[in-house]
């Protein structure tokens, strides 16, 4: 039977767009299939803040940051904690990615029009000591234009290639199976779905109006992870993090459903590290949701005081911005699946950002006038102030007794008691009477303000939480928010999938490739157990590039 294309790509998200455009540029004829509508081109990446992990960049050097491949690789290994036999390929992917982040990545993107916001962020500052989890230096390079600014580069390339006839974008095509002949993947089958005018991110219909079967020499799976499928998240939840939360909010649209992982497994592909995942502890119920259970993550600065559901301050190093999974594990160990920030208006104004392109109109819209407003006045950004006013998880009060009463009303219980909360806040506030302190969180605040980027836009001047001049007081109920899948289809460095087999030895499954989150962002889990942030979009870029180029070489 003849081929409909040289390469078929499943998924029109960022990894799929990169793989498609690279394969076409290498000379291949490509079809991209996606179950969603054209409005969702770029998929999950569109909603992101657009942060990219890069190493030893001009942006870092201008801010006095000294970085290197050796330092970044040491940080990566400390975060990843590779400790399994199946980490062979993920470890190789990780090393290759760190070198990419220090080498080709910035210039490759810049040549296509990508630009970076000049202040480099310092995410996931880490845990206990220099040999453990965390970024030693700021590496979070924010895209000028956020997630849409990344997507538009490759969407523009794809549309130009589509006009030449070398690339076909086929939306509302849901893949339900892989065609396997002689042990090789030679195509896909599935259902054509009815058109749906729903705006980007909203759920679409699953009405079947026909079937399709397409054949190609290579099939690249770029279908994303499982974060929108709470049942699948709970099924894969690792015991090491504690019990799976009873309540979670979704940080990704419902179409991030994990279907293709199961379909690929059924066809013979091997998956690894399915118990590794990345979820956040600072999730908010969106007052203006786009998808079901839509959650938004707070990207906090270091100053908010963090309490568990019973009002006990979280122990070191579980402070805002330090160790996402360590904090998640601690929160779940308390027997509850939520926690609290207590802060002031001065802190929320300087330190609160919300993850998501739609929550940052100044950065997404490339509007310097709006960005300048972050530095003036008493108010936070308009989206943050809207959450403070309308969000179900926010309480605002002029006194601590009033605030604690409102917190209990939000939680629907009486777990919080005024006296111990007040005592803990006063203990912390006393530590600000000198320029030195024994409070590790306050030490961290002083340290972060030594970095120009944090002092300018991300870290408030240290002050007493109970100082009326800094008020009003604010409390935020924090929910667990699903986000990323860190395990998936196992691949070699070209994105070629391995066949599932019992016992030792690995065998490539001819014709089948994977890239992006469905492959744990490369190899079946290049992040290991933890991520250094800014590595998710970058993982889609790197694995999509590798798979697209490799598939084209293999079939042409």
Image: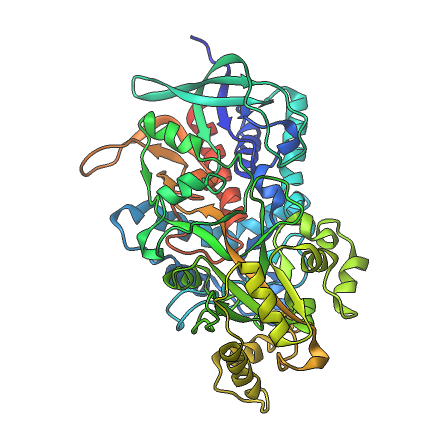
**Residue 551 vs residue 534, the one in the foreground:** 534
From the top left corner, tell me how far across and down residue 341 is, in percent.
Answer: 56, 67
Q: Which of 192 and 542 lies nearest the eye of the viewer? A: 192
> Is residue 455 shown left or right of residue 366?
left
**Colour setting:** rainbow
Residue found at the very far top of the displayed protein? 1
Residue 338 x, y percent position in the rendering? 48, 59
Taking the view exactly as shown, the residue that stands out farthest to the left is: 503
Query: Front-most of 261 and 284?
Result: 284
Quarter-of-image position of residue 113: top right
Reply above or below: 224 against 279: above
Residue at 71 percent of width and 54 percent of height? 363
Give the residue drawn at x 79%, y 70%.
Answer: 377
Does residue 329 show up?
yes
Task: Specify whether 509 is left or right of 370.
Answer: left
Is 40 situated left or right of 226 in this image? right
Can residue 30 be seen?
Answer: no
74, above or below 177, in the image: below
Residue at 62 percent across and 44 percent down: it is 47
Up the image or down, 68 lies above or below 113; here it is: below
Q: Where does residue 525 sit, x and y in percent of width and height?
A: 38, 46
| Total count of labels | 0
Image position, residue 164 (x, y; %) = 66, 21
Check the image and name the residue furthest to the bottom. Answer: 434
- The image quarter containing residue 390 is bottom right
Which residue is at 52% across, 38% downward? 15
- Placement of 351 over or under 440, stated as above or below: above
């Amino acid at each position: 039977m003849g081929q409909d294309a040289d390469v078929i790509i499943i998924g029109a998200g960022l990894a799929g767009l990169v793989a498609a455009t690279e394969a076409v540029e290498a000379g291949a004829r490509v079809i991209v299939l996606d179950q969603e509508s054209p409005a969702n081109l770029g998929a999950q990446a569109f909603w992101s803040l657009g942060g990219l992990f890069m190493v030893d960049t001009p942006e870092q050097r201008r801010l006095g940051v000294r970085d290197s491949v050796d330092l970044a690789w040491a940080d990566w290994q400390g975060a990843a904690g590779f400790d399994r036999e199946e980490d062979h390929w993920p470890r190789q992917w990780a090393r290759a990615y760190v070198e990419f982040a220090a080498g080709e990545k910035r210039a490759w993107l810049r040549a296509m029009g990508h630009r970076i916001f000049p202040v480099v962020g310092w995410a996931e500052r880490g845990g206990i000591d220099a040999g453990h989890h965390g970024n030693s230096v700021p590496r979070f390079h924010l895209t000028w234009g956020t997630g849409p600014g990344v997507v538009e580069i490759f969407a523009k390339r794809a549309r130009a290639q589509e006009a030449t006839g070398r690339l076909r974008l086929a939306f509302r095509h849901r893949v339900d199976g892989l065609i396997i002949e002689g042990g090789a993947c030679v195509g896909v089958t599935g259902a054509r779905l009815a058109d749906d005018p729903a705006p980007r991110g909203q759920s679409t219909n699953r009405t079947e109006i026909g079937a399709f079967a397409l054949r190609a020499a290579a099939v690249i799976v770029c279908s994303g992870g499982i974060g929108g499928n709470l049942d699948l998240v709970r099924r894969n939840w690792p015991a090491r993090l504690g019990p799976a939360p009873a309540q979670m909010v979704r940080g990704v649209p419902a179409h991030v459903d994990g279907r293709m992982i199961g379909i690929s497994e059924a066809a013979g592909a091997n998956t690894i590290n399915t118990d590794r995942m990345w979820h956040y502890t600072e999730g908010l119920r969106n007052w203006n949701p786009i998808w079901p259970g839509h959650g938004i993550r707070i990207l906090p600065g270091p100053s908010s005081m963090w309490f568990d559901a019973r009002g006990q301050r979280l122990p070191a190093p579980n402070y805002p911005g330090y160790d996402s999974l360590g904090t998640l594990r601690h929160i779940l160990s308390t027997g509850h699946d939520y926690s609290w920030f207590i802060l002031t208006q001065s802190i929320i104004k300087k330190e609160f950002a919300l993850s998501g392109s739609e929550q940052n109109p100044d950065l997404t819209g490339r509007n310097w006038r709006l960005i300048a407003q972050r530095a003036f006045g008493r108010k936070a950004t308009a989206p943050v102030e809207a959450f403070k006013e309308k969000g179900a998880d926010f309480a605002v009060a002029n006194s601590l007794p009033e605030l604690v009463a409102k917190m209990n009303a939000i939680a629907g219980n009486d777990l919080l008691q005024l006296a111990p909360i007040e005592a803990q806040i006063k203990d912390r506030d006393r530590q600000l009477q000198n320029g030195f302190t024994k409070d590790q969180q306050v030490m961290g605040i002083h340290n972060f303000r030594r970095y120009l980027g944090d002092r300018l836009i991300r870290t408030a001047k240290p002050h007493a939480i109970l100082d009326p001049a800094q008020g009003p007081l604010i409390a935020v109920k924090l929910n667990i928010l699903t986000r990323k899948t860190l395990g998936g289809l196992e691949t070699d460095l070209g994105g070629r999938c391995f066949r599932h087999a019992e016992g030792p030895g690995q065998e490539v499954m001819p014709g089948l490739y994977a890239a992006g989150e469905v492959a744990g962002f490369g190899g079946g889990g290049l992040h290991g157990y933890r991520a250094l942030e800014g590595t998710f979009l970058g993982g889609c870029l790197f694995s999509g590039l590798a798979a697209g180029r490799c598939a084209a070489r293999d079939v042409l």
